[in-house]
C-alpha cells in the first residue's frame, strides 16, 4: 500500500513536471522573436527615408507590432513568429503593403521603394515640429523653426538662442566665448553676411532661417577662417511640389514694423524659391564713459551717449533650380539688399575739478544717413552619378556692394561759456567686390568609405574713400590730416582633400587643406603700403565611436586661422567722440589656432544630453587695448584710444553641456552651460598683458503647451564676469518671453514676444591704464516688444514625430 501511494506521488510529480515543461516550451515557442531588417528609400531620389513606419498585422490574433526607420532609412524590428500583412507608410508617400509574410526566422526584406503621393504633395506641405538638436560627426544642428522668442526678430536674435553661441550687446557673435567665428549661409560665404556680418545679421529676418549648424571641429572641406569654428545658417527652401508660401507681419515697440515671406513653386523639372523681407525700425540705445583717478577715486571726466538707430531695410533672394534628368541640376539665384539707415548720436561730456564740480560741459551731436546696396549673383551645377553619394559640384558667386555714409557733427560748449566749437561733415564712400569660385568632388569607395577633394578661390577688393570737412569761417574745408582713401585687397586660394571611413562602430574623417593668402593695404596720400603673403597648411581629423543607436563619443582636431579685416587694420581714428577713439593697426598679423574637441552624446526616451571638453592654443592672439594716447582734445581732456594688438600666445580650455528634457508632452525644458579658462602672454608698449582668468555662461529655456493650441516660452541667459590683464567685465542677465496661438485651422499663428524683459542687456566694463580707471556701460538696443502674425499658404502646421537626434557618424559630408 505504501509503495502504491509512493508510485501515485511519483506519477503525479512526473505529470506536473511534464506539464510545466510543456507549458514552458509552448510559452517559449510563442515568445520566440526574429529580426526583420531592410531599408526604405524614395523611389525617385534613392535616398533613405527617415522615420518611415512599418506595421505588422498578424493573420491570427490582435497583437500588432511595428517600428520606424533610422536616418538612413534602415530598420531592424523584432517580430514574433507568425504570418503578417506588413504596411509601410511615410508622410506624402503612397502606402505599400506586403501580404502573407511568414516570419519563422531572421528575415531581410532588402530595399523597399516608396513612391511620392503627388496629390498629397500638391495639396499640402507638412511643417513638422523638429527636435532641437542633431549630432553629426563634425557638427551640431539646431532646428530653430519653433523658437517663438525670435519671432519678428533677425538672425542675431536666432543665434543668441543657440547653445555655445553668444551675441554681445553690439551684435558681435562669439562661439564658446571666442569672437573669431566664420558665418556661412547655406554652407557658403554669402553677401548676406560678407561685408559687415554684425549689421547684415540684423537685416536677415528670423523667419527665413530653418536651422543653424554649429561646427566646432570643421573638416577640410570648409575654409580655414575662424579660429573658434563655423556657424552655418541654413535658409528655408521647400521640397513640396506645387505652390506653397508663408508670410509673417511684425509690429513692435520700440518702433518696429516689418513683413517677410518665403515663396516656393516646385514642378517636375524646376523649383522656384524666394526669401523676401522688409523692415522699418528705430532702436534706442545708450552708453556711459567715466574716467576715475584710481588712487583718489575722483572722477575727472565722463560722457553720456544716446543713440537712435533706424532705417528701412529690404532684402530679396530669388532663385531657380532646374533639374537636368535625375542626376544633374543647375541653380541660379540673385540676392539684392538695400538699406536706408539713420543714426543720431548725442554725446554730453563733463569735466570735473578735484572736488568733482563741473568746470566744463560740452555737447557733441552726430547725425548720420547711410545708403547700402548689395547685389550677389550665384550659380551652382551639381552632377550626381550612379553610385549613391558620388557627385561633382561647381559654384560661382559674384558680389558688388556700395555703402555711402554722410554725417554732420556739431560740437558745442554748454558751460561755462556757450559756444559752437566746430562743425564738420564726414563722408564715407565704400565700394566692394568679391568673386568666389569653388568646386567639390565626392567619391564613395564601397559602402563605408569616401574620398573628397576640391578647390576654392576668393578675390575681395574694398575701396574706402573717407573725407572730413571742417567749417572754417562759414566755409567747409577738407581736413587732409584725417581724410584718406584706403584700398584693401584680400585674395585667398585653397585646395583640400579628405578621406572618411566607417569600420565597425568607428567612423573617421581626416583631411588636409592648403590656403595661400595675399593681403594688400594701401593708403593713398600717406606712406603706407603693406603686402602680406603666406601659405599655410590646415590638417583636420574627426573620429566617432557609436556605443549604440543613441549614444556616441567624438574626438576632433583642427588647425585654423583668423585674418584681420580692413577695419582692424585701418590706421584712421573714429570721429563720434573726441576723447574715446577706435583706431586700427596696420601691422596686425593673423591668428593661428590648434584645437582639440572631445564630445559625448546620449539620448534617452525623454532626455537628450550632449557634452564636450575642448582645448585651443592660439599664436599671435588678438586683444583690444585701451590706453592713454598722451594727447588731449581742445578742452584738455585726455584722449583714450582703443586698438587691436597681437599678443604672443593664448591657451584656452573649456567644457560645456546641453540637456533637453521632455517630462510630459506639454512641457519642454532645455539648459546649456559653458565654462572656459584662458591664459594669455604678451607685452605691448612696456605693459605686460599676460593674464589668466575664466568666465562662463548659461542659457535656460522652457516651453509649455496649453489647451486650445496656446504655447508659452521663456528664455533666461546669464553671462558670467570676465577679467584680463587690463580690464574686467561684469556679469549680464537677460530674459525673453513669448506667447503664441494657432488660428485659422492651423494655417495662421499669432504671437507676442518680449526681448530683454528686464532691460538688463548691457556691457559694463572697467579698464585700467596708468593712474586711471575707465568705466564704460553700453546698451545697443533697449527692451523690444513684438506682435507677430504668420500665415501659411498651402502649408499646414502639424506636430509629427520628431527627427532623430543623431547621425551615427556615417555622414562624411559634414
Image (tube, rainbow, N blue to C red):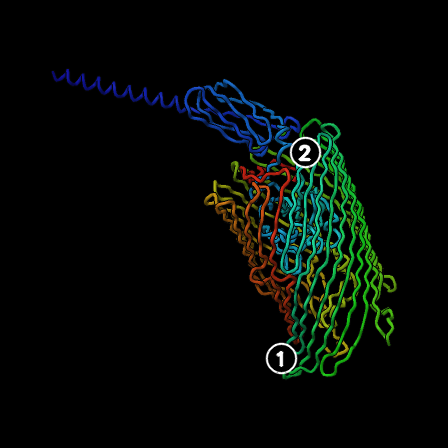
Residue 240 horizontal/vertical position (percent): 65, 34
Residue 420 is left or right of residue 108, and the answer is right
What mark, if any, has residue 247 been given in the picture? none
The quadrant of the picture occupied by the C terminus is top right
Compared with 280, 88 (above or below) is above
Residue 288, image quadrant: bottom right
In front of the other: label 1 or label 2? 2
Work out whether residue 157 can be spotted: yes
Look at mark 2 in the image and give the residue it sits on.
Answer: 242
Compared with 251, 762 (above or below) is below
Residue 309 horizontal/vertical position (percent): 70, 62
Work out whether residue 581 or residue 13 is closer to the camera in this orientation and state it: 581
Residue 763 horizontal/vertical position (percent): 62, 64
Which residue: 54% across, 37% down? 800
Work out whether residue 292 or residue 483 is closer to the camera in this orientation and state it: 483
Work out whether residue 142 can be spotted: no
Residue 748 horizontal/vertical position (percent): 59, 44
SS at mark 1? strand
Which residue: 58% across, 59% down? 756
Look at mark 1 in the image and give the residue it sits on.
Answer: 298
Amino acid at each position: 500500500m505504501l509503495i502504491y501511494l509512493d508510485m501515485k506521488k511519483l506519477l503525479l510529480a512526473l505529470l506536473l513536471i511534464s506539464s510545466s515543461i510543456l507549458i514552458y516550451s509552448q510559452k517559449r515557442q510563442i515568445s520566440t522573436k526574429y529580426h526583420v531588417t531592410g531599408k526604405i528609400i524614395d523611389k525617385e531620389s534613392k535616398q533613405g527615408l527617415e522615420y518611415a513606419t512599418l506595421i505588422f498585422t498578424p493573420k491570427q490574433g490582435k497583437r500588432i507590432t511595428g517600428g520606424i526607420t533610422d536616418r538612413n532609412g534602415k530598420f531592424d524590428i523584432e517580430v514574433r513568429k507568425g504570418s503578417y500583412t506588413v504596411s509601410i507608410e511615410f508622410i506624402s508617400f503612397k502606402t505599400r503593403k506586403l501580404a502573407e509574410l511568414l516570419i519563422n526566422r531572421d528575415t531581410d526584406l532588402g530595399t523597399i521603394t516608396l513612391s511620392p503621393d503627388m496629390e498629397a504633395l500638391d495639396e499640402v506641405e507638412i511643417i513638422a515640429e523638429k527636435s532641437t538638436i542633431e549630432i553629426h560627426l563634425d557638427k551640431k544642428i539646431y532646428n530653430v523653426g519653433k523658437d517663438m522668442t525670435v519671432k519678428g526678430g533677425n538672425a542675431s536674435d536666432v543665434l543668441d538662442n543657440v547653445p555655445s553661441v553668444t551675441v554681445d550687446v553690439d551684435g558681435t557673435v562669439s562661439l564658446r566665448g571666442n569672437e573669431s567665428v566664420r558665418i556661412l549661409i547655406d554652407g557658403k560665404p554669402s553677401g548676406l553676411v560678407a561685408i559687415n556680418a554684425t549689421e547684415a545679421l540684423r537685416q536677415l529676418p528670423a523667419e527665413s532661417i530653418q536651422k543653424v549648424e554649429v561646427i566646432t571641429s570643421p573638416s577640410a572641406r570648409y575654409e580655414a577662417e575662424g579660429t573658434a569654428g563655423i556657424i552655418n545658417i541654413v535658409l528655408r527652401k521647400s521640397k513640396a511640389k506645387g505652390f506653397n508660401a508663408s508670410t509673417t507681419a511684425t509690429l513692435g515697440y520700440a518702433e518696429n514694423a516689418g513683413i517677410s515671406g518665403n515663396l516656393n513653386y516646385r514642378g517636375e523639372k524646376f523649383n522656384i524659391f524666394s526669401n523676401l523681407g522688409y523692415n522699418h525700425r528705430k532702436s534706442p540705445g545708450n552708453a556711459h564713459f567715466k574716467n576715475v583717478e584710481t588712487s583718489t577715486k575722483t572722477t575727472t571726466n565722463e560722457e553720456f551717449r544716446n543713440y537712435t538707430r533706424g532705417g528701412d531695410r529690404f532684402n530679396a533672394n530669388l532663385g531657380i533650380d532646374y533639374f537636368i534628368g535625375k542626376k544633374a541640376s543647375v541653380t541660379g539665384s540673385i540676392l539684392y539688399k538695400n538699406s536706408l539707415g539713420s543714426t543720431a548720436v548725442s554725446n554730453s561730456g563733463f569735466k570735473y575739478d578735484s572736488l568733482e564740480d563741473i568746470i566744463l560741459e560740452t555737447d557733441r551731436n552726430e547725425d548720420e544717413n547711410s545708403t547700402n546696396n548689395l547685389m550677389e549673383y550665384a550659380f551652382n551645377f551639381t552632377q550626381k552619378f550612379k553610385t549613391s553619394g558620388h557627385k561633382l559640384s561647381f559654384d560661382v558667386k559674384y558680389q558688388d556692394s556700395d555703402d555711402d555714409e554722410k554725417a554732420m557733427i556739431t560740437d558745442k560748449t554748454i558751460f561755462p561759456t556757450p559756444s559752437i566749437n566746430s562743425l564738420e561733415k564726414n563722408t564715407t564712400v565704400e565700394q566692394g567686390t568679391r568673386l568666389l569660385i569653388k568646386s567639390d568632388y565626392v567619391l564613395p569607395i564601397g559602402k563605408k568609405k569616401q574620398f573628397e577633394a576640391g578647390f576654392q578661390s576668393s578675390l575681395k577688393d574694398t575701396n574706402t574713400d573717407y573725407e572730413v570737412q571742417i567749417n572754417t569761417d562759414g566755409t567747409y574745408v577738407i581736413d587732409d590730416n584725417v581724410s584718406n582713401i584706403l584700398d584693401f585687397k584680400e585674395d585667398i586660394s585653397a585646395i583640400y582633400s579628405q578621406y572618411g571611413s566607417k569600420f565597425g562602430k568607428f567612423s573617421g574623417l581626416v583631411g588636409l587643406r592648403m590656403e595661400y593668402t595675399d593681403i594688400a593695404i594701401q593708403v593713398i596720400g600717406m606712406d603706407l603700403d603693406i603686402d602680406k603673403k603666406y601659405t599655410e597648411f590646415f590638417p583636420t581629423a574627426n573620429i566617432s565611436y557609436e556605443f549604440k543607436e543613441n549614444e556616441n563619443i567624438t574626438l576632433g582636431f583642427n588647425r585654423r586661422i583668423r585674418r584681420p579685416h580692413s577695419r582692424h587694420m585701418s590706421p584712421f581714428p573714429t570721429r563720434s567722440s573726441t576723447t574715446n577713439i577706435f583706431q586700427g593697426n596696420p601691422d596686425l598679423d593673423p591668428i593661428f589656432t590648434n584645437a582639440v574637441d572631445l564630445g559625448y552624446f546620449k539620448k534617452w526616451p525623454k532626455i537628450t544630453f550632449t557634452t564636450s571638453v575642448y582645448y585651443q592654443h592660439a599664436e599671435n592672439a588678438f586683444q583690444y587695448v585701451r590706453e592713454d594716447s598722451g594727447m588731449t582734445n581742445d578742452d584738455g581732456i585726455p584722449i583714450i584710444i582703443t586698438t587691436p594688438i597681437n599678443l604672443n600666445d593664448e591657451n584656452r580650455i573649456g567644457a560645456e553641456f546641453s540637456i533637453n528634457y521632455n517630462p510630459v508632452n506639454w512641457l519642454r525644458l532645455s539648459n546649456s552651460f559653458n565654462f572656459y579658462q584662458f591664459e594669455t602672454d604678451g607685452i605691448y608698449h612696456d605693459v605686460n598683458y599676460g593674464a589668466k582668468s575664466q568666465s562662463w555662461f548659461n542659457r535656460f529655456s522652457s516651453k509649455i503647451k496649453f489647451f486650445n493650441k496656446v504655447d508659452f516660452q521663456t528664455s533666461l541667459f546669464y553671462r558670467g564676469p570676465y577679467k584680463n590683464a587690463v580690464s574686467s567685465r561684469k556679469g549680464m542677465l537677460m530674459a525673453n518671453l513669448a506667447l503664441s496661438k494657432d488660428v485659422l485651422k492651423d494655417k495662421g499663428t499669432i504671437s507676442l514676444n518680449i526681448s530683454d524683459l528686464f532691460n538688463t542687456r548691457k556691457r559694463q566694463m572697467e579698464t585700467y591704464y596708468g593712474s586711471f580707471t575707465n568705466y564704460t556701460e553700453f546698451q545697443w538696443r533697449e527692451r523690444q516688444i513684438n506682435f507677430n502674425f504668420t500665415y501659411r499658404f498651402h502649408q499646414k502646421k502639424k506636430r509629427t514625430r520628431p527627427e532623430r537626434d543623431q547621425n551615427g557618424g556615417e555622414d562624411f559630408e559634414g
